[in-house]
Amino acid sequence: MQEVYGIFHRSIRDLVRWEVLREVLVTGIPMLFIWMGIGWVFWDELLKWSTWLINWVPFSIVKANGAMLVLFLLWALAVLVSYAFLTAIIAPLVFRKMKKGYYYYSFTTLLGFAILWGWLMMLNWGVLEKWIANKLLVWLPFQTVAEGSAVLLNVYVFYSFYVLSLFLVLSLYRKEFLETIREIEYPDVEIATERVKAMHFPVALRDSLLFIVLTVLFFPLLMIPIVNVLIQLFLWAWLYRDANFRATCQLYCSKEEYERMRRHRAVIWSIAFFASLLNFVPIINIFTPFFAQLIVFHWIMQEKGVGTGNQERTTKTAKENE
């Protein structure tokens, strides 16, 4: 458990380092505007298709799915409002001394509120779902509920392709990204002289194409509550689970290490599913592909048996930089 916490903690700390955060923002923000522009152009056509598809779905399913989407929006709003309220209270007292620690605070606080509000809503799921589905949505005509569901479905489609584009960009420039962290955390580790034939980018491209194909095939199932969440988790995990592992091993693993670590399929899938869950958390979801890569990177370094001797030096350097 302590080893898992150590990997998680180092991944968050590295993600909010300015050297890394700068690369993430330079990639994520322009890509966000690009997909907003694409969404603006193709929104109406996709909305017509989504609405047409939903019109074939029984109202009971549309109503249940609508209730789930409303709950998800309430959850996201609760997370953001809680974060803003807490930040407004402690900002005058703490932030002057925190300096770079603000980014770490933001990530962990958002994640904590996401878990807290998710747990509270799960405890009261039956009551909330029944109230929204049987009291709120029944007041609205079918067409209104269907169009609302179609709008949210459109948002999901464009957001999924936004995540996919970040994944592909990171796959192309993973050496520069990982070397930034390696030079800080593991200065004694060098790029392997004999490269492992992991075929990293072809695998990333293959998984991306499969992601698109499966998204199209499973699109009708996205109207079914719970099933749509499981499908999203599976598709994102499928995207992360193999390419990130190969991306790191191709740079830093020997052939023996690669063959040994690839047998830990349960660990690789667990990391991928955890990263996929973060795609649902507001604001944090912008950084998820990079965070997923960092977790795999630190796990591989731990499996290699390096890095433990560098922690005190790294912590001291981080404090000096602040």
Image: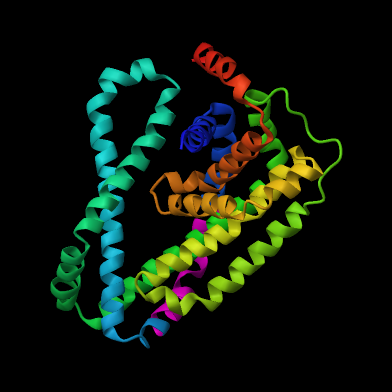
Task: Specify whether residue 58 is in view.
Answer: yes
* Horizontal and vertical percent position of residue 242: 65, 55
Numbered disc total: 0
Q: Is residue 27 above or below residue 302?
A: below
Q: Residue at x 83, y 43 (%)?
A: 195
Q: Residue at x 57, y 21 (%)?
A: 311
Task: Specify whether residue 173 is in view.
Answer: no
Using the image as rendered, state which of residue 125 and residue 181 is in the foreground. Answer: 125
Task: Answer with the quarter of the image where residue 90 lies.
Answer: top left
Residue 288 located within the stretch drawn in magenta: no
Predominant secondary structure, magenta span = helix
Q: Residue at x 43, y 66 (%)?
A: 230
Q: Residue at x 37, y 76 (%)?
A: 224
**What are the residue bounds of the magenta stretch?**
34-52
Task: Answer with the quarter of the image where residue 210 lies.
Answer: bottom right
Using the image as rendered, state which of residue 221 and residue 230 is in the foreground. Answer: 230
Using the image as rendered, state which of residue 129 and residue 153 is in the foreground. Answer: 129
* Horizontal and vertical percent position of residue 62: 30, 78
Using the image as rendered, state which of residue 257 and residue 119 is in the foreground. Answer: 257
Colour basis: rainbow
Left or right: where 96 falls relative to 247: left
Left or right: where 296 falls relative to 138: right
* Horizontal and vertical percent position of residue 17: 53, 28
Residue 47 located within the stretch drawn in magenta: yes
Q: Is residue 211 above or below residue 23?
A: below
Residue at the extreme top of the image, as rendered: 320
